[in-house]
Image: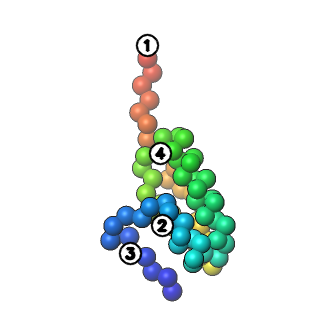
Amino acid sequence: MISFDFGLGSYTYGALAEIIRHHGKNPEQAQELYQRMVFNALIGNVDDHALLYTFASNGWLLSPAYDVLSTLIFSPTS
């Protein structure tokens, strides 16, 4: 059983990629993590954090993305 304590500090994208590469059923999902990181940056999602990256119990696969939204303030000019 793999256990991660997210209460002790924060995980970086690099650390999450290493977890995927070493413990995941499909190590190539580290590329999926990178694509999610780029997407979040492009849409202005600054509320992206390690707890949003979970693993499905079917062999430690990265779960589908969720809670993805732009947190930029939109203020139309008149």
Q: Which residue is mark 3?
A: 5
Check whether the beta carbons of the residues at disc 4 and disc 2 lie within 8 A of each other. no
Residue carrying label 2 = 15
Residue 21 position in % (x across, y down): 59, 72
Measured in 3D between alpha carbons, the distance from the residue under mark 4 to the one under mark 3, in whole angstroms, is 24 Å
Residue 12 place in picture, x, y as percent:
44, 61
Front position among marks 3 and 1: 3
Q: Residue furthest bottom?
A: 1
Left or right: where does residue 12 sit relative to residue 40?
left
Q: The disc labelled 3 sits on which kind of residue?
A: Asp
Q: Note whether residue 70 is visible.
A: no
| 12 lies above or below 40 | below
Give the alpha-carbon distance from disc 2 to disc 1, as whole Å. Answer: 45 Å
- The mark that comes first in sequence, 2 or 1, is 2
| Residue pictured at 47% horizontal, 45% vertical | 45
Give the crowd class for mark 4: few <14, some 14-19, many >=20 residues within 10 Å.
Answer: some
Q: Residues within 10 Å of mark 1 (few under 14, many from 20)?
A: few
Contact flag, marks 2 and 1 (Cβ < 8 Å): no
Please name the residue that numbered disc 4 is placed on. Answer: 45
